[in-house]
Amino acid sequence: MAKQAVARKRRNREGEVIESAIEVFWRKGYPAASIQEVADHVGVLKGSLYYYIESKEHLLFRIVDEVHRQSTEILEEVQALDVPAIEGLRVYIERHVEWYLRNIKEVSVFFREWRHLTGEHLEIVVQRRRGYDRAIRDLITAAKNDGDLGESVDEKYAALYMLAAVNAVPHWYSPGGRDSPKAIATAFADMTVGMLEGTRAAKPRPPERRSAA
Amino acid sequence: MAKQAVARKRRNREGEVIESAIEVFWRKGYPAASIQEVADHVGVLKGSLYYYIESKEHLLFRIVDEVHRQSTEILEEVQALDVPAIEGLRVYIERHVEWYLRNIKEVSVFFREWRHLTGEHLEIVVQRRRGYDRAIRDLITAAKNDGDLGESVDEKYAALYMLAAVNAVPHWYSPGGRDSPKAIATAFADMTVGMLEGTRAAKPRPPERRSAA
């Protein structure tokens, strides 16, 4: 029992360290933040922090890793749904955006700072992001094969378009704005499906454009 | 005549300084880049650079200012077209993305580095970006008033969605890829109009979602 209590305390303290690192990296930016500030935020001496983490970069990797784990969980939930791919994409965007908005600091640290990782850490993140983008593109292809996409949708560009739009949400969101995370998530899901279903090649251009082209 | 030649030479040299700064900031990132490196790239002594510019930040502001000037020019051209707003938005995205892709270094420096500006420089850029976003939102509202938008399009979120998608193009574009800047620009214009015209509220959710909500 005593051993379990120690293990639990250790896990709780680890959680506090990660939470503090998110807060400090979010406020100061990763390059400017120091381990000392994280220790101050937890309320322990800098030395005892090294019982839980190896380095500042290790802390960043833990945050990035956790964001990725939760992201993948949402994707896997959606892949397991018994619905057409286009509906899967809608549900995916909705859950994803809502989760972003409810974890805004963590997600912002992820997007702003992951490029500061090095070596194996960076390699892991790049690989995962690639696999992740591929999964989204596969869902778009499946929707196209179902006949649910607009006639001229290019899967690669559609994936880049929607992921950029969705991944920018943490940049402009301010908690306490007029809409709930849920309402924003639904609007973004609707726009994504609208883009995928509604895209068709342009009608002939107005004369002004023809001469300019 | 001699006076004009001196003025012309000065202008040319100023252009070279800006071009070199774009190259150096693009390769090293603004915080890590030094005036010395810009001078080396131009092929002059660091001291003579101060004949053309006041400081490193002043150089960054000149780049940002030039990107903004060209951006505004495209927007004003589009606003002057005698076409429905939805067509204006299409032409705008097409010209804008193509211009981004043909000026990738300059535009990347703009998006990556403008936050490093300070004081009045930063204030000017923030104001301009606000005016710019407002102009796009006004075009969307005009398209809505024309009855050209999907039933459930929220102008604010639609503007954020499309601008994020379009502004991320310089992040992933690699010159020499399979498609021309023109082809990518057309795909992005089509997707934007598809999103604006095609967005509608979701049909009822699959049962799995209802219980989870």
Image (cartoon, coloured by chain):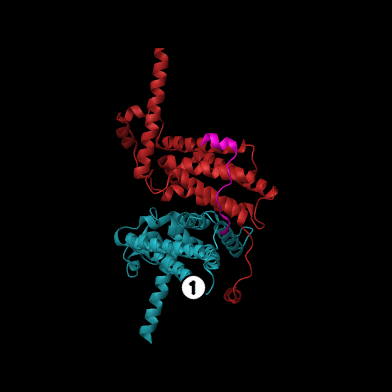
Chain colours: A red, B cyan
Is residue A48 shown above or below B3? above
Confirm whether residue A86 shows in the render.
yes
Query: Of B172 and B200, which appears nearest the observer?
Result: B200
Instruction: Give amino acid for label 1.
Output: Glu
Q: What residue sits 43% from the left and 38% below the top?
A: A60
Relative image position of residue A62 (x, y in whole percent): 45, 34
Q: What residue sits 32% from the left and 31% below the top?
A: A42
Query: Of A49 and B111, which appears nearest the observer?
Result: B111
Q: What residue sits 48% from the left and 61% below the top?
A: B105
Is residue A51 shown above or below B159? above
Quarter of the figure with residue B148: bottom right
Q: How crowded is the residue under tag 1: few (<14 C-alpha within 10 Å), some, or many (20+)?
A: few
Is residue B12 shown above or below B33? below
In the rendered view, does B81 fall on the left or right side of A137?
Answer: left
Residue B198 among those drawn in magenta: yes
Furthest-top residue in this view: A1
Relative image position of residue B188 (x, y in whole percent): 57, 59
Relative image position of residue B197 (x, y in whole percent): 57, 59
In the rendered view, does A21 fall on the left or right side of A155?
Answer: left
Tell me the residue that label 1 is attached to.
B77
In the image, which residues are magenta? B197-213
Residue B208 among those drawn in magenta: yes
- The chain ID associated with circle 1 is B
